[in-house]
Image: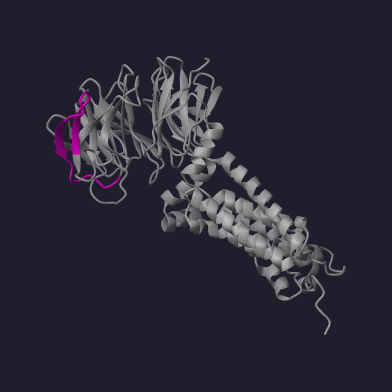
Amino acid sequence: MQPPIPGAGLAGSGGYATWVWALLRIPLLLVLLVLLRRPLLDLTERYFGIERVTEFSITVLSTPFTRIGLFALTVAVLWLLYRRASAALSAWGAYAATVLIGCGLILALFLGTGTSPWRAFPPMLCLVLNQLPVTGAHPMWSRLMAWGVGVAELFFFRLYWAWMRFRRHPAEPAPVVPTRSSLAYLPGWLITAAAVGGLVGGPRLVEAERALRMPAGVEILQERNINGLALDPGGRYLYVTGHGVRNLQRIDTQDPHHAMISSEVSTGGAQGFAYDPRAGEVYTLNLQTRMLQYFDATTLALRREVPLPDISPGDPWIAADGRTNTLVVASEADERVGSPFIVVDRQSGRSLDKRDVDAGNLLLHPQGSLLYLSFFRNSSSLMVYDLERREFSGEVRTDARVDRMAFDEARGELLLASPLRSSVLRFDARSLALLGEIKSVFGVRVMAIDTQRDWLVSGSLATGQIEIQELATGKVLSRIYLGPWLRSIVVDPRTATAYVSANGALYKVPYGAGR
C-alpha cells in the first residue's frame, strides 16, 4: 500500500471561498467581540467577578517590561532546545525532548514566581500541540483547519498555515508540511511565549519590574495591602490604614522606618478613614463590629465608639465636617442590605440622615458643609450633598467607572479621575458644570494637588505609574514607575514628596527632584 503523501490530508473542496473564510474569521470574531463588549463584560463580571477581571488586567499591564523579557526568553529557550534535540534525535524524539523539558521549565517558572500552576496549563498545551511533528496527511486535519476557529490558529499553526497556502492555490499540489525545520515551529513558540508572558504573575514579577524601572530615590516604607492615607498639616506624621493593616498607624515621616505607633484597638483592617486635625481625631469604621471609632490623633488611643448596625456591608469611606460637626459614612454596599450612606452627629453619635446611595468615594469641600460623591460601580454620576440642609443639592452624569476626586482651590474646581478615558474631568465646584478635561496617565484613578507648585500628581490603576504635570498647561513633567494597584496619594508640597499606597506597598516618592 502506498504511504500517504505529506500534506495531502490538507486538501479538499472549497478552494478560494474556504481560504477567504479562514483568513477573515478571526478578524470578524474580534469585531463581534468589540460590538458585544458591554454584555460580555456584564457576563464576565457576573460569573467571574469584577475583582478577578480587574486583578488580571492590572497584573498584566503593570509589568510589561518583565513580561516582554519572559516572552523573548521563552522563544530563545525553546529554539535552543529544539535545535539541540533535532540534531541528535528523530522527529518524534526531538518532539518528546522539547516538550518535556519545555513544559518542565514553564511549570518551574510559574511555581517560582508564586503563580498558580493551573495557569501554566494553557502555554504548555500550546507547546505540546504546536510542536507535533505530523505531516497533516489524514483528512481530519482539513476538517479541523476549516472549522476549528481559534483552535487551528492557536494550537496547530504550522498545519493551519500550510492548509491556508493550499486553499489559496488549490490547483497546485498539496504542500509538504515540514516536520524538522526550526522556522516551521517558530510561530508555535511565539504563541507559547505569548501565553507565558500573559499568564505568569506573582510578587516576584513585580519585584523584577521595580528593579528595571523604579527610580533609586523611591523608598518602599511597607510591603502590605494599604489604602487610606492622610498627612497632618505640618507634613510630619502620616496616618495609614488598609486591609493589610489591622490597626491604625501613625508614621513619623522624618524617620519612617522606625518611628511609628499603632493603635491598641483594631480597626478591622478598615479601608479608609477621616482625619480632622482641628478636632485632633481620626475616625474609622470597623466593619467586623459595625462600630464607628474615634481615635486620638496624637496617641491613637480609642476615645469612643458609636454603633452603626444599619450600615451596609462593604468597604467604607468616611468624611468629617467641622462646620456641621457631622461624620458621613458611605459603604460601597457589596450587599444590598441596610443603609450605604449615613450622616452621624459627631457629638452625640445619633444618625441624622440615611440614604440608599452607595458611593465609591467621598470628598469634603475645603470650606466644609458640601460633600462630593463619585461612583465606580452602580452609577455614572457625580453628586453633591449639603450637610447643613442634609439633602442632595446637585447631580450630573459622568463617565462610567469614575474614581477618586481632588479639589483645586486656586480655580474653584472639582477634579474627577476617569480611568476609562485616561483623563481627569474638571467640574465647577458649585454648579457641577463640566469645564473640560486634563489628559492624564493611562488608567488614572487617584490624584493629589501640589498647591505650592500648581502641579497635579496622579496615579494609574493599570500601569503602576504616577504622573506629575502642570495644572495650568497640562504639560507632563515626569512619570515614575512604582508598582501595581496604586490606591491613594497624599503630597507634602514643602518637600515635594508624595506618599502613595498600593495593594502590596507604601511608597515615599521625591517627585520634585531636580525641579
Depth check, front residue: 470 or 151: 151
The residue depicted at 51 percent of the width and 35 percent of the height is 210
The residue depicted at 26 percent of the width and 27 percent of the height is 275
Above/below status of 1 relative to 370: below
Depth check, front residue: 226 or 377: 226
* Quadrant where the N terminus is found in the figure: bottom right
Asked which quadrant contains residue 219, the reply is top left
Residue 185 appearing in the image: yes
371 to the left or right of 37: left
Above/below status of 444 relative to 22: above
Asked which quadrant contains residue 507, the reply is top left
Tell me how many marks there are. 0
Residue 108 percent coordinates (x, y) = 53, 53
Residue 491 percent coordinates (x, y) = 40, 22
The residue range painted magenta reads: 292-314
The residue depicted at 75 percent of the width and 70 percent of the height is 136
307 in magenta = yes
Q: Residue furthest front?
A: 88
60 to the left or right of 323: right
Q: Residue furthest bottom?
A: 1
Q: State how the image is colored.
A: one colour
The residue depicted at 82 percent of the width and 74 percent of the height is 5
Above/below status of 356 relative to 30: above
Residue 179 percent coordinates (x, y) = 76, 64
Residue 150 appearing in the image: no
199 in magenta = no
Residue 512 percent coordinates (x, y) = 48, 18
417 to the left or right of 442: left
